[in-house]
Amino acid sequence: MGGVTDGCLRDGRCPHPGIHPFHLRGHRLTSPFRSARLRAAAGATLAKGHPLSSTSSFTSSTSSSSSVSLSASKSSVLAAYGWDGTWADAFAPYEAEGLLAGRVVRVDRGQCDVATADGTVRADTAFVTPRDPLRVVCTGDWVAVEPEGGIPRYVRAYLPRRTAFVRSSSSERSEGQILAANVDHAVIAVSLAGELDLARIERFLALAWESGAQPVVVLTKADLVPDAVTRAHLVQDVETAAPGVPVLAVSAQDGEGLDVLAAVVSGGTSVLIGVSGAGKSTLANVLLGEDVMDVQAAREVDGKGRHTTTTRNLLALPGGGVLIDTPGLRGVGLWDAGSGVGQVFSEIEELAGGCRFHDCAHESEPECAVLEAIETGALPERRLESYRKLLRENQRIVAKTDARLRAEIRKEWKRRGAVGKAAMEAKRGRLR
């Protein structure tokens, strides 16, 4: 899949030489190419790259064949899972030791399934399960596995990750939890069966941007909103909460929007994330062309989903690309996602550059450009409140593991307390 950005605001298919793109409010996405001639033409056309392009970031497959030390036949098998020359170079030292290259497709209770050139093998993760939860092997990792013969077979190491999708664990130990590794697209599934929770979408987006992946918001079950005007308003609401992010309305029931989604996930590795009942497993089955993932209907009482998927599963798509389906997330805690929060609320950070004070808190300071934007209606107040909330939460998480930051926060609290106390005393003096 490749893509470029243009000024077209029309949704749907449009003519373009050689690559059959879809327009999605300014984002032109190309569908999978079925012939070598079209792939070559598309590669030349899309040479400049785009956040959703297979030529961007870490999905490039342009590395020369001379850098690939594995045999051509084995490399072609692994290529379906995202193997390229850069991975081959990183794996060379392990190949010299007689280890096999593979990608983790599932991790379960100290064991993992690894897709190798010789097929999927079961291996023990004892050597790649350190105390640091962020260094534990996970779905999407490229690993070095012992050759056949040992019982059990062990994963000896994993290659340095290009990206990692991390959230704060639900425990009280202030630990990060890695959900998927080496991801290019973070597909955030949001059901239209219930009321949109824009704040939750902003949380997912912050984690996605922080991971290094390109986020895409997919509004599922669009058939439950038959009125086109209402649906357009819902898409617009999400676009306001997700600046710079493609927003797709799709329906597995009638097929709406699925061709565009297939074009997105056909380039690189995509991870499906969202709450239970968002329709992630249903989307995975549609993209795979068969019922691989178990699905259940949402509860009729409150529309909430049931936890059907219990592990993170990596699946090679028939049209190209790799998909990681994940269990529904009840908690979406941030984990050192300061830059991700800034990207989600880029318009606020841009406005902040026009404030009189460089450390403006956008609360009651004079000549605050952010507050002025709220007064004029240019910035929804909900966006500012959500921005503040996520910043505070992220600061608390980081402070738990950073003593210096904790000291700075305490110092700032004392300073603000002193300012507030002085203001109250001055006010009482005037009243007397």
Image (spheres, helix red, strand yellow):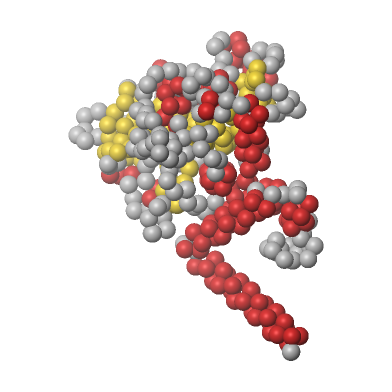
Is 117 left, or right, of 212 in this rendering?
A: left
> Quadrant of residue 180 in the image?
top left
Q: How many marks?
A: 0
Q: Nearer the viewer, residue 137 or 193?
A: 193
Q: Is residue 258 above or below residue 276?
A: above
Who is closer to the viewer here, 40 or 25? 25
Between 411 and 146, the residue placed more toward the observer is 411
Residue 286 appears in the figure: yes
Q: Quadrant of residue 159?
A: top left
Residue at the image position 48 percent from the left and 43 percent from the top? 165
Residue 323 falls in image quadrant: top left
Seen at 34% across and 53% down, the residue is: 131
Residue at horizontal 30 percent and vertical 44 percent from the top:
127
Q: Quadrant of the N terminus?
A: top right
If the image is split into quadrants, where does the C terminus sit? bottom right
Residue 201, relative to residue 5: is it above or below? below
Looking at the image, the residue that sits furthest to the left is 151
User: 291 or 299: which is nearer to us?
Assistant: 299
Asked if residue 368 is positioned above or below residue 126 in the image, the reply reads below
Q: Position of residue 413 (x, y in %)?
A: 59, 72
Give the residue at x 63% y 46%.
Answer: 343
Q: Position of residue 38 (x, y in %)?
A: 61, 12
Q: Position of residue 332 (x, y in %)?
A: 47, 48
The answer to whether residue 60 of the structure is visible from this angle is: no
Tell me: 263 left or right of 5.
left
Q: Residue furthest bottom?
A: 432
The image shows residue 188 at horizontal and vertical percentages of 52, 36
Work out whether 177 lies above or below 96. Answer: below
